[in-house]
Amino acid sequence: MATNLTYSNFQSEVIDSDQPVLVDFWAEWCGPCKMISPILDQLSGEIEGQAKIGKVNVDEARDLAVKYNVKSIPLLLFFKNGEVKDQIVGANVTKDQLKSKLLALV
């Protein structure tokens, strides 16, 4: 299951993580966000121990959305060693594509 990220745990869960982290910026009212959510939850189980997945609700964590310049959602950011290494905008992506991008950072 993906971790719910907030401003208070973002540093420890993402920036200081020793594993790559895929962060999903989403909102409750976003249809494509809801489409991609079960894919991310499945993927989270498959990559456990190798990488992590977290979710940022942009309505609840506006400061993070601003910090990472989120203009449209879903926005998927791939972090390694605290830095954004890759990104995908939108939900037009398969679980296998996400998995290979994430595991390429391991």
Image (cartoon, rainbow, N blue to C red):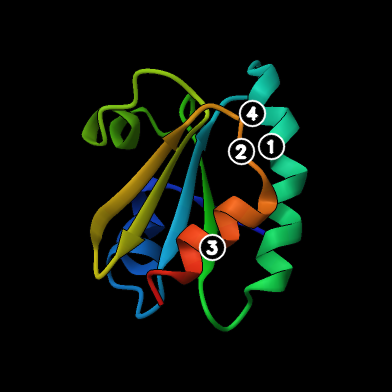
**Is the residue 81 above or below the residue 2 in the image?**
below
Mark-to-mark CA distance, 3 and 1: 16 Å
Amino acid type for the residue under numbered disc 4: Cys
Using the image, tell me which numbered label, if any, was put on residue 93. 2
Q: Secondary structure at mark 3?
A: helix
The residue positioned 38% from the left and 54% from the top of the image is 78
Left or right, residue 8 beside residue 37: left
Mark 4 to mark 1: distance in Å?
Answer: 5 Å
Instruction: Confirm or deny contact between disc 3 and disc 1 (CB under 8 A).
Output: no
Element assignment for label 1:
helix
Please say if the residues under marks 4 and 1 sit with CB atoms less than 8 Å apart.
yes
- Name the kind of residue labelled 3 in the image: Ser
Residue 36: numbered disc: 1
Q: Which residue is mark 4?
A: 33
Residue in the image at 49% along x and 70% along y = 103
Instruction: Give the residue at x 34% y 68%.
Output: 12
Amino acid under disc 1? Ile
Q: Nearer the viewer, residue 33 or 58?
A: 33
Q: Are marks 1 and 2 in contact (CB under 8 Å)?
A: yes
**Residue on which disc 3 sits:** 100
SS at circle 4: helix
| Vertical comparison of 96 with 81: above or below | above
Q: CA distance from mark 4 to mark 2?
A: 12 Å
Question: Badge 4: few (under 14), some or many (20 or more) residues near its Cα, within 10 Å?
Answer: some
Q: Earlier in the sequence, mark 3 or mark 4?
A: 4
Q: Amino acid at mark 2?
A: Val
In this orientation, does residue 3 appear? Answer: no
Query: Label 1: few (<14), some or many (≥20) within 10 Å?
Result: some
Q: CA distance from mark 3 to mark 4?
A: 20 Å
Label 4 or label 2, whichever lies nearer to me, is 2
